[in-house]
Image (tube, rainbow, N blue to C red):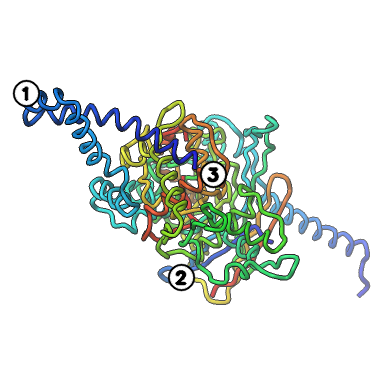
Amino acid sequence: MSSIKIRTKRLDGNTQIRTLISHPMEHGRNKDKVTNKLIPAHYIQVLTVTHNGKTIATCNMGAGISKDPYFAFLLKGGNPGDAIVINWVDNLGNKDSEKHTIT
Amino acid sequence: MALDNRFQASMMHTDTTALIHTIDFLLMIPYPKKSAKLIMGNPLWRRLSLILISFLIALPLYATPKQDQAAFRKHYQLVFPQLKLADYANGVYAIDEIARQSWLAIEEFPPYETAIEEGKKLFNTAFSNGKHYAHCFPNKGIADEYPKWSKTQGEVITLAIAINNCRTSQHEPALPYEKADMVNLLAYLSHTSRGKPIHVTIPKNDPRAMSAYEQGKAFYYQRQGQLNFSCATCHIQNAGKKLRSEILSASLGHTSNWPTYRLKWGEIGSLHRRFAECLTQIKAEPLPEQSVEFRNLEYFLSYMGNGIPISGPSTRK
Amino acid sequence: MKVNRRKFLKTTIAFSAAGIALLESTLAKAEWLAADFAPGPFDATMKQLLKGKPIVETDKIDLNIPEIAENGALVPVTVTSSIKDIQSIAIVVEQNPVPLVIQAQLMPELEPFMSARLKIANTSFVFALVETEKVCYSVKKKVKVTIGGCGG
């Protein structure tokens, strides 16, 4: 199942794109309470948003973003049927992608 | 039953001592010399007056749950005159404006949505025998009726217990209370009940139900732990006041918003997990989820919150 | 006309090389800029981010963030701006071990708007940086992060 949820809504002639992602965003400085070992860093580094195939946002981030990250952007205009795709890559090389059609 | 008697006995003992001092004082006020002479001089009079006044002052101790509920709410009405009953479903966010803004921003796309989805999937997955949870829970939106008293089992049944009762009746293993599957199911069932007013009852045809309620109530008012706090210390006496930088929430409505994605946990968890955490925070021994004490406490608190809409699952700090 | 094979090969290779170079530079852009996310003091991070661009404080950026964080693990923030032709929005938390939290390169298809949820380790100034081609505009707000009542 995808880790990415996408919602869009019309806002004064623009389209707000909101996304909620399931990801630990672990910075690597926390210790496991049971083993007392450091929990390895595991966080999204790059997130991209495309609109009808064109990249409209490229976000570089670190583990300073909260666990289960949320982002919102505001697309100028936007029409029903438009495709929004969100991709992410994390520091361990994991990836995920999700598509959403504006209604 | 032994526990009941001990509870009541200990409450009676401390209260009687306090009462005797109070009575002495009260008796002195109107006719200090006269009444003192009369009562102190006559042993029978002394005993009779003590019994009468003890009875009158002790009457609130034997109040009905309805009277408890009225007194409980009256207190909060005085502290928070601006709040309506339904507002208490939002806990501290009804009284802390800065925290409320943060909470509303998070509610735009809340982190508990995954739990609702997972819970829905679990609810709709068939057991090995082909039956579904719907066999036990034919109606949607049932979280508002829990906890319930079970005459056959002789204990308070929370929704979590009911889920496991369903599973075992269909020859499925019970789910551990603190693990994700149970919490996700609770999230889904809470979500389908959103907006429905809490409606918990204490059946009159089984005195054990009232006893469980009274035990929950006693636990609530009992001082515990190294810090020697009771639930009432923070959530009645100091509701709305600051404890370091936090504003303390009212107990009224405390059972309406669970399970909760607690920012501190970075995940969704149950009411009993929070109860256990509270005990740890006052340096008392935490109890396990679904222990009889926690179920009775939930029974008492839910009854106090009757009429408040279910607002779970939710986000809290 | 006879096709000169050598010439043909040379041209093809030249074009391919150019193509690969172009592809690599696109990938490089999407590559995570480790230097920007190095742990370290705020001043060093800002120097690395700005790369010599002048920084100007402005009231044309709205940094919507609570003044007291309920829990430093999740602080919701929204940045909007009336500045035209922006290239990116970045958020820097002065007291965080890694001050740069996020840098979003936004194409002209997007309005100057971004919401995110940040971790703020300790009471700190939070900066919103809006970059245009020539200037980096900034605004800051102080966010208090406190110990909760019963220890959290």
Q: Can residue B229 be seen in this snapshot? A: yes
Dot label at residue A10:
2
Q: Quadrant of residue A55?
A: bottom right
Q: Chain of mark 1?
A: B
Q: Is residue B143 left or right of residue A83?
A: left
Q: Chain of mark 2?
A: A
Picture layout, residue B124 above or below residue B95: below
Q: How many marks?
A: 3
Q: Is residue A82 left or right of residue B24?
A: right
Report the front residue among C151 and B254. Answer: B254
Q: Position of residue B169 (x, y in %)?
A: 67, 62
Q: Can residue C90 be seen in this snapshot? A: no
The span from disc 3 to disc 2 (Cα, nearest Å) is 39 Å
- For marks 3 and 2, give the one nearer the viewer: 3
| Residue at the image position 34 percent from the left and 30 percent from the top | B14
Q: Amino acid at mark 2?
A: Arg
Q: Position of residue C7 (x, y in %)?
A: 89, 62
The span from disc 1 to disc 3 (Cα, nearest Å) is 57 Å
